[in-house]
Structure formats: structure tokens, C-alpha cells
Amino acid sequence: MKKILLILTFALAVGMVLITCHKEEEEEETGLLINGVVWAASNVNRSGTFATKPEDPGMYYQWGSNVGWSSTDPLTATDGNNAWRDLSEKENIWLPEKDPCPSGWRVPTEDELNSLTQTNYVTHIWTTENGVSGYRLTDKTTGNSLFLPAAGIRRNSNGSLFGVGTYGLYWSSTPNDTDACYLTFGSGNFYMYSSNRALCGSVRCVSE
């Protein structure tokens, strides 16, 4: 009986060690601190999931919606309704139940996205990673860096693809009258703007 208890105690101890090690690995991958904000390493793919690699485009989202749209043709949507919707969201916040970010993450605010444009704290290098063009952003103090692929968009009028490989649009959760604010960039520019909420762009989450 003592021998059985000893074996069980050892097994539980080993299990606890394995669980602890796994938890530590997850904590190491929780995000990248850039200019005071913790960012996910990859874009959102299907709602509630991240793309596998930083250079993967993930899926596109209209403002205020958790319905993902394909970043390649043919045009498809994660809710099965593939007919394009030139929506006009009435809510002036990105509701938690419609946030496409995984648990523990959320769509960034305008101020959080704007922190990436501040060249006093962050360097911007237009580059190519594994054949994908985009910006490599590096915190000047910590040396942490993240890659934003130029994933392009789907146009608000008809859902057609635009700017894949040359243009990026990353939504904030912040409205601007009937429009909404986003980070936009090409090979020679990187700035905040606002436009039609029906534009279908990328989402890069921040830690809650």
C-alpha cells in the first residue's frame, strides 16, 4: 500500500512539473511589448484564432463584426453567407461579443495603434519576410519587434481585393462619426486614418 501511494505521489509531482512547464511556455508567447502596448505576434485568422505565422494575412474583418472574410479569392465568409454586405454598423463601439480576437485579447484602440507610428520610440522598416511584404516594427528601448504583413483589403463597395502585397489596413475599435479609425501603410507611408466601416481589413490584437 505504501508503495502504491509513493508511485501516485511521484506521478502527481511529475504531472505538476509538466503542467508548470507548459504554462511557462504559454506565458513566453503571450505577446510583444512595443512602446508600452502588448501586441499579438500574428493577425487574427478565423474569429477566436490567430494566423499560424506573422507573415500570414489571416482573414479580413469589417468594423464591428466578427465575421471573417477570405484574404484570397473566391470570396467566402465564416458565417456561410458569402454574398457581400456593404454594412453600416450602428453601434459606436466594437461590442465584446463581436470582437474577433481570441480570449484574453481585443481589438486595439486608436491610441494603441497610433503608438506604433511614433518614430521616437519605434523604428519602421519596409521589408519582405518569407516572400511577404510588410513593415517590421521595433521598439527602440527593448528591441522587441513585430511584423505587419501588407495583407491588402476588400473594398467596401463590392468586396473585391485591393492592395495585396502593397497595402495594409489594421482596424482600431475607435469610431469616428460614421467612419472608424485604422492604421494604414504602403512602402513609403505609415499613419492613422479613418474611413468607411464596411472596408474589410486586418486585425492585430492587443492583450487585455
Image (spheres, rainbow, N blue to C red):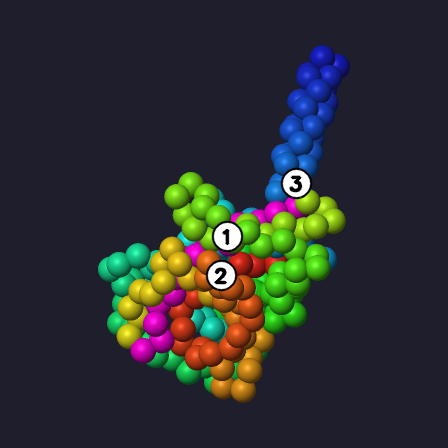
Task: Check the image and name the residue furthest to the left.
Answer: 74
Which mark is drawn over residue 188?
2
**Picture coordinates of residue 75 (x, y %)?**
27, 63
Which mark is drawn over residue 98?
none
Q: Nearest the camera: 200 or 147?
A: 147
Earlier-in-chain disc, 1 versus 2 = 1
Instruction: Give how far apart the Cα atoms at labels 1 and 2 are.
Output: 8 Å
Label 3 sits on a secondary structure element that is helix
Q: Is residue 15 above or below residue 53?
A: above
Q: Quadrant of the N terminus?
A: top right
Residue 144 is at least partly visible in this image: yes
Q: Is residue 145 magenta?
A: yes
The residue where tag 1 is placed is 126
Earlier-in-chain disc, 1 versus 3 = 3
Q: Is residue 119 left or right of residue 78?
A: right
Which span of residues is magenta-colored?
144-157
**Picture coordinates of residue 9 (x, y %)?**
72, 22
The nearer-to-camera label among 1 and 3 is 1
The residue where tag 3 is placed is 28
Amino acid at the residue labelled 1: Trp
- Residue 76, quarter of picture: bottom left
Instruction: Give how far apart the Cα atoms at labels 3 and 2 are.
Output: 33 Å
Q: Is residue 49 magenta?
A: no
Do the CB atoms of the residues marked 1 and 2 lie less than 8 Å apart? yes
